[in-house]
Amino acid sequence: MFKMRFCFEKNGAAAYISHLDLMRLFQRAFKRAGLHLKHTQGFNPRPSVSIALPLSLGVESRCELLDFDLEGEKVPNEQILEKLNACLTEGVRVLEVYDTGAKIGKLAYLDCIVNLEYDQDLPETAREQICALFAGEEVIVEKKSKNGVTEQNIIPMIRSMTIQQTGSREISLKAMVCCQNPTLNPMQLSAAIEKYLPDLTPAFAVCSRVEIYDTENNVFR
């Protein structure tokens, strides 16, 4: 058995593939590629695959990690990449395959971009208002989980942020946020604007993941 990991991207229309469907997609791709996944033991065996930080529906990414266990003889990493990409749908692509990877517990930060789109031209002070909001010490938003809805202050979970008005009807938030213990969903940045600056509520918000880092700010793989 060989424990392995690969980095993949999920973009375009593929961003709307749910997490469960994405897992099924990869399981079928391994099978079609002739790569034999190890299965769990017990009454209902399952393929040994897992994704480090499952994506929310509609979020794009170019830094997703999938861990998997292969049975049989060792297959060169480049062949695994080529075989899988030949079997995956458009918008999902393996970028690199690794023999080993860092422990998931050391995953800490996420670089992300949240683009805010508006139906009308923005006021001249839009960027300044948003900058002032996130420059404060407390911004409380709701967080939904399996245990219900709680409130959290997201400011301590934002390590850095740049805010740019990229057009008369567009604002871009580029941020490094905590992605584990605690976790900040980047879409909560848009939710905060909607709550505290209702006149600047975007008509549409698009989020993408750019890179992930460990506790020492090194790229996590």
Image (cartoon, rainbow, N blue to C red):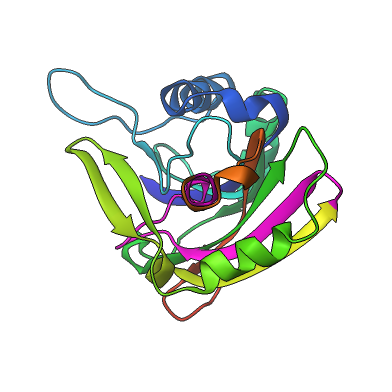
**Magenta residue check for 179:** yes
Q: State the image coordinates of residue 5 (x, y, percent, origin top left).
A: 48, 50
Q: State the image coordinates of residue 91 (x, y, percent, origin top left).
A: 70, 30
Residue at image location 71% in from the left, 57% down from the top: 126
Residue at image location 74% in from the left, 61% down from the top: 125
The answer to whether residue 39 is left or right of residue 214 is left
**Magenta residue check for 66:** no
Quadrant in which the N terminus appears: top left
Span shown in magenta: 167-194
Total residue callouts:
0
In front of the other: 87 or 195: 195
Residue at image location 55% in from the left, 44% down from the top: 198
Q: Is residue 32 above or below residue 79?
A: above
Q: Is residue 44 visible?
A: yes
The answer to whether residue 196 is left or right of residue 122 is left
Q: Is residue 10 above or below residue 7?
A: above
In front of the other: 94 or 174: 174
In front of the other: 11 or 78: 11
Q: Is residue 86 visible?
A: no
Residue at image location 58% in from the left, 24% down from the top: 16
Q: Quadrant of residue 184?
A: bottom left
Residue with the most extreme left position: 43
Q: Is residue 30 above or below residue 164?
A: above
Residue with the most extreme bottom position: 216
Q: State the image coordinates of residue 22 (x, y, percent, origin top left).
A: 50, 26
